[in-house]
Amino acid sequence: MKQLFLSIALAMTGVTYAQWEQGEYVDEFGDKTGTKYNFIQATGVFSNSASTNAECIYFMEEGQGMVGITIYPYGGDTKERWIESAYNEVRIKSPNGEVVALLGFFYDQGMILLSDSEYKIFMDTIAPGGTYTVSTKYKGKYSESSYRFKFKI
């Protein structure tokens, strides 16, 4: 019996993404597709030529081998848009102070994509749990903006 309890306890400690909430994709008609994804919604700040440290909502979605971070500036009133897509650095600060830099694809529709090896590094970085801070800047040909938020795993 002790071995069974120990096995269950060890298995439970391996569940590192337990605080992600789970959603399900829908099709064009709003019907659930059966494909699930994990998400975290966080509040942070953003700055650009018109605002400094304005409230911003971040929707971080994990599924199908990628993490997508959708940005809703001004407290969620609008979805972020950039004139052009670009690759920019995304930095993650761990609870122990270690900073990991990743290369994210800033899709012009307001989403930062981390895929392939960047996805794996991101998930490995947050696996221990705790409070993490994400800091990044969009640098395009015509504009710059910065984004920062915290989330807890």
Image: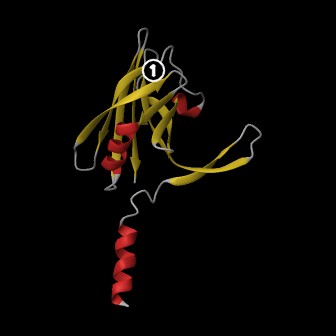
> On the picture, is 85 further left or further right than 32?
left
Foreground of the two, 40 or 113: 113
Which of the 4 quarters of the picture holds residue 100? top left
Helix, strand or loop under label 1:
loop
Q: Amino acid at mark 1?
A: Ser
Which of the 4 quarters of the picture holds residue 153? bottom left
* Residue matched to label 1: 51
> On the picture, is 141 further left or further right than 82?
left
Residue at the (42%, 27%) spot, across then down: 105
Q: Is residue 82 above or below residue 15?
A: above
Dividing the image into 4 quarters, which one contains the N terminus? bottom left
Q: Position of residue 50 (x, y in %)?
A: 46, 16
Dot 1, crowdedness within 10 Å: few (<14), some or many (≥20)?
few
Colour setup of the view: secondary structure
Q: Position of residue 141 (x, y in %)?
A: 41, 9
Foreground of the two, 19 or 105: 105
Q: Position of residue 140 (x, y in %)?
A: 41, 14
> On the picture, is 35 further left or further right than 43?
right
Residue at the (32%, 49%) spot, across then down: 124
Residue at the (35%, 38%) spot, across then down: 117
Residue at the (57%, 28%) spot, across then down: 79
> On the picture, is 22 further left or further right than 127?
right
Q: Is residue 81 above or below residue 143?
A: below
Which of the 4 quarters of the picture holds residue 10? bottom left
